[in-house]
Amino acid sequence: MKKFLPPFLLALALIGGFTACNSPESTTAGLKLELTSIERAGDGTVRVAWRVQNPNVFPYLLSKTASKLSLNGTLVATLTDDSPLGVPAQSRADRTAELKLANATATAVVDQAVAQGSAAYRVDSILTVLLLDEQTEKIRLTVSGTVPVTAK
């Protein structure tokens, strides 16, 4: 029995070491996205302000973001931003974009949110983070909350 135990423990240690090397743990864990405001201009355009928070000790460069925005349970827009966004270490980065409303129902939902002054939101996003040279990591995030909605 004593001759069997050391090789068995060695085999367990090797298996544990190999599985730890292949661990899918993300280097970008902890990145968060949130909406900060939605504003409808007098000409009918709608702008959304959003923020990415980085609690990590490394800065990140988002090369692309793609998000589906729902207000009060209704999909109102799909947002794609191909311009790079630098997110400093242990800080945040803000961005504003114009929404292309999906249809007349989406316009009605935004009008109702303006009348209420806020809306419950849900954002399903894919953040593409440039890690090194051309190597990227895609992060899927789903966030929800309440956002102020105003008109100019």
Image (tube, helix red, strand yellow):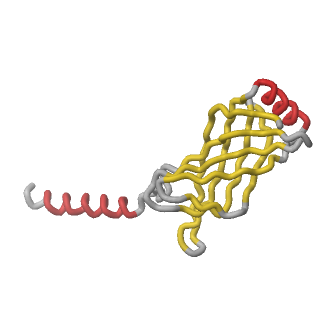
Q: Quadrant of residue 106?
A: top right
At which x and y percent is residue 107? Answer: 87, 35
At which x and y percent is residue 16? Answer: 30, 58
- Of residues 18 and 68, the one drawn nearer to the viewer in this rendering: 68
- Of residues 150 and 133, the one drawn nearer to the viewer in this rendering: 150
**Rendered position, 34 above or below 134:** above
Q: Residue at x 80, y 49 (%)?
A: 98
Task: Please identify the residue farthest to the front as the structure is shown.
Answer: 152
**Rendered position, 60 above or below 118:** below
At which x and y percent is residue 149? Answer: 75, 33
Query: Considering the image in quadrants, where does the N terminus appear?
Result: bottom left
Q: Residue at x 72, y 50 (%)?
A: 96
At which x and y percent is residue 93? Answer: 60, 54
Number of numbered discs on residues: 0
| Horizontal relation, residue 33 to residue 27: left or right | right
| Horizontal relation, residue 99 to residue 119: left or right | right
| Horizontal relation, residue 1 to residue 25: left or right | left
Task: Please identify the residue farthest to the left as the structure is shown.
Answer: 2
